Amino acid sequence: MGQIGVLTLMFSTIAMLWNMIFNFLFDHAQKRLGFERGLGVRLLHGCLFEAGLVVLLVPLAAWWLSISLLQALVLDIGLILFFLPYSVCFNWVYDTLRARYVRRQSISVAYEKR
């Protein structure tokens, strides 16, 4: 049980760091290429994010649990099936709320300057 708990902590830490790095790189690509974040781009974003996690987490799980890469991938499939729709929805909601916040802040600043 302790071994799985430590692995879960490592997974969470790696996922958080990967999220920050991946979103920074994705935002940079969006600024450079000028694409909009419609449904297709959001699905691509989620798939690429999860693929990066698979590359990072499956070898770690295989090593930590002394199992094969295939066994670790099978264990990770449940996480992927849950977190792919979660990450797409979470990022969509975050982007929507952030855009509203930024818009309100800019309106507030413009109103104060009058």
Image (cartoon, helix red, strand yellow):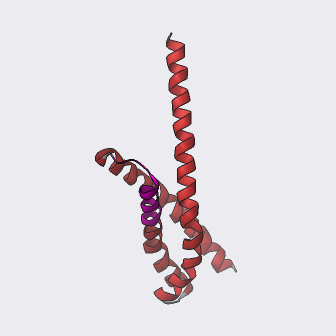
Farthest residue to the right: give it.
1
Percent across and percent down for residue 55 are 43, 73
- Total label count? 0
Percent across and percent down for residue 33 are 29, 48
Classified by dominant secondary structure, the portion drawn in magenta counts as: helix
Farthest residue to the left: give it.
33
| Residue 56 highlighted magenta (yes or no) | no
Q: Residue at x 54, y 72 (%)?
A: 80
Quarter occupied by residue 83: bottom right
The stretch in magenta equals 35-49
Which one is nearer the viewer's eye here, 50 or 103?
103
Percent across and percent down for residue 31 are 34, 44
Q: Residue at x 56, y 64 (%)?
A: 85
Which one is nearer the viewer's eye here, 78 or 3?
78
Which one is nearer the viewer's eye here, 27 or 62?
27
Left or right of residue 54, residue 78 in this image: right
Q: Residue at x 48, y 88 (%)?
A: 70
Quarter occupied by residue 89: bottom right
Quadrant assignment for the N terminus? bottom right
Farthest residue to the top: give it.
114
| Residue 48 highlighted magenta (yes or no) | yes
Farthest residue to the front: give it.
39
74 to 36, vertically: above or below: below
28 to 1, vertically: above or below: above
Q: Residue at x 57, y 72 (%)?
A: 81
